[in-house]
Structure formats: structure tokens, C-alpha cells
Amino acid sequence: MPESKYNDLRSARWFAPHDLTGFVHRTAIQAEGFSRFAIKDRPVIGIANSWSELVNCNIHFKLLADAVKRGVLMAGGLPLEFPTISLGESLMKPSAMQFRNLMAMDVEESIRAYPLDAIVLLGGCDKTVPAQLMGAASADIPTIMLTGGPQEPAHFRGKQLGVGTDTWKYADELRAGKITEADFDELESAAKPSAGHCSEMGTASTMTSLVEALGMCLPGSASIPAVDSRRGQAAEATGRRAVEMALSGPKPSEILTKEAFDNAITLLMAVGGSTNAVVHLLALARRVGYELQLDRFHEISQRTPPDRQRTTVRGIPGEAAVRGRRHSDSAEGPGSTPEQGRCHRYGRVPR
């Protein structure tokens, strides 16, 4: 790659000039133990990490960030990780929704303010995913998302549980005297068996699935379980892809088109996902200047039969194509399948 190609990078505004400002910027990086070679002629990839010990959904993100960094380095980029606010449904009061826009601002301004050529978003819990997407969409720097993956399904006395639905059921049985407090304590110990977001098709699984339908992550990556080795492989592949995007795009505004939102709504209807997704998709659409209307959800719902048996995450690719009408065209040319369409530009998760 000719040097002039790298001089066009956004980060070159910070690091390339041979003046006092460039001197200050380069010394700031060298103070962290990086050499001048680390920032010369290579894209800088920001990893927006919502890891927090207050959010069990995201507790494994340090390992995922390491895998993303590995991919970035393999592709010739410099990965720089930075923290963001982390929104957790279980512990945050009064509601994580109250802080979604605050997190979006945090992500947007961090991206804008620093010398970053492309972004990898690490998100999982309910409001974290839309908040990160909204912030990245407003900053409009090439961005790819890696979701954390669903946790392992819970089992209680030989039965697989839904994280929310069965919890309320057993809570009602406790109040009715059908089970004892000891029984409920046993359920508590089994309810969340691993890292990862809730595996039932609640808000978290819905939003991570819609990330894939929108074209903002590697195809096939949304439903890989959090503890599966393929999740790390997807993280590595995401890092490699981020370096490519830093050099040639696309930006969120080029991915989040009307057709992309139609794909997301189709998938939402096909899987019978969370109604909270409506609120988040409306907000995200407005970040890219698309006035998505509620009527569009109704229109697409009329042509998309839902899977009424779906309560947990299964494979996302092709779901909307089978049950509805999924747009398969992209800015790079038309495609006849989801893998040849909008998500085509991101390559594939290794198997």
C-alpha cells in the first residue's frame, strides 16, 4: 500500500505532522510503550468496550477485546481499547433505558475526539447495543459491532428455562405456595449459568440479532454463544475486517439505509422479538437521517409470519429470508441471498 494511502487516514491528522502538535500526539502514544513504528503507516482501530463487573452480560468482554486486538494486529492495524458506560438491566435503577442516550453520547464523543480510523463496538446487554450503534452512527466513522453472545441456557430439575418467562412463573408459584423458598433458592443458583446476555428472545437477543440484519456485524456472529470458542474466532475476524474498513469503508451512513431497516424489521417480526426494538430502531434511524415511521413496522408485519415457537436464540442468517421478504441488495451490488447481500462486505465468520 503506498504511503499516501495512509496519509489520508483520519489518525494521520494527529500523528503525521512534523510540528509541535504532532510531536505531542506521538509522545503521548510512546509514553504507553508504543514505538513510532506502531503508529506509522497503519490504521488505528478503536475498540469501544462496555465491559463492567456491574453487568454480568458483558463480563467476558476483556477476552473478546484481546481477540479483536489479535485480529487487528494480524491485519496490520494498531488496536487501542477505550471504555464506555455500561448499561446493565439487572442492577441499574431506575431503568437502564434512562441512560441509553447518555451512553450514546459517550460513544459518539469518544469516537469523534480521538485519532481513530475505524471502530469495533463491544456490546451485549439490552440498552448497550442500541446506545453504541446510535453513537457510532452519529460519529459516522467506519464501524463494525461484535456482540457478546447469549449465555448458556439455564436448567432447573431437568427442564430448560427461559431467563424471564420461567422466572416469573416460579415467582408466582412461590407466592401461591406451590414451591418452597428452598426450591426458589435452588432456582436462583441455576438461573444464570454463564457469561453472556439473556438467551431468550428478549431485548438483548433481539437487538443483537438485528445488528446482523442491519449489516453492522459479521454474518453468522450474532447467535454464537458467549462461551463458544467461535465467539473468539468471530472477534478475531472482526478485528481483521475493521482494518479493511478503515482503509475503504463503509461508514454507518452507507450501511444503515432504508433497506437495512426493512431487513431488521422483517427479522424482528420473523422471530417475534422484543417490542423494545421498535423504540431503538426509530432512534437509530433518526441518527442517519431516516424518518422511519411506525406504520412501516405494521406494513412489514403483514407479510412476515412469526415463529411462535421461538423463545431462544438460534441461527439468524436466512431467518428473515425464509419467513418474509429480506432485501438482499447492497451498495456493492445486488445479491440473491443474505450472505451475498448487505452483509457480504464483512466476509464470513470462520468455521
Image (cartoon, helix red, strand yellow):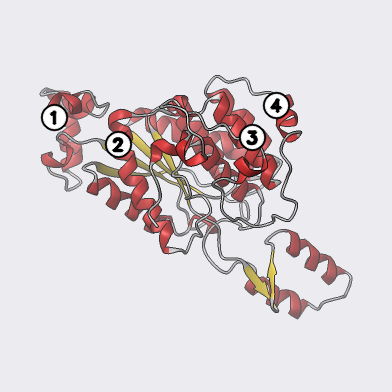
- Is the residue 114 above or below the residue 90 in the image? above
Mark closer to the observer (1, 3): 3
Labels 1 and 4: the sequence-earlier one = 1
**Amino acid type shown at disc 4:** Arg
Q: CA distance from mark 1 to mark 4?
A: 52 Å
Residue designated by label 4 = 296
Q: Is 29 left, or right, of 155 in this rendering?
A: left
Labels 4 and 3: the sequence-earlier one = 4
Q: Position of residue 257 (x, y in %)?
A: 53, 25
Q: Position of residue 7 (x, y in %)?
A: 18, 25
**Amino acid type shown at disc 1:** Phe
To which quarter of the image does residue 84 belong? top left
- Is the residue 147 above or below the residue 136 in the image? below
Q: Nearer the viewer, residue 317 or 172?
A: 317
Q: Nearer the viewer, residue 142 or 330?
A: 330
Q: CA distance from mark 1 to mark 3?
A: 54 Å
Q: CA distance from mark 2 to mark 3?
A: 30 Å
Evaluate whether residue 338 shows in this view. Answer: yes
Mark closer to the observer (2, 1): 2
SS assignment at label 3: loop
Q: CA distance from mark 4 to mark 2?
A: 34 Å
**Amino acid type shown at disc 2:** Glu
Circle 2 crowding by C-alpha within 10 Å: few under 14, some 14–19, many from 20: many
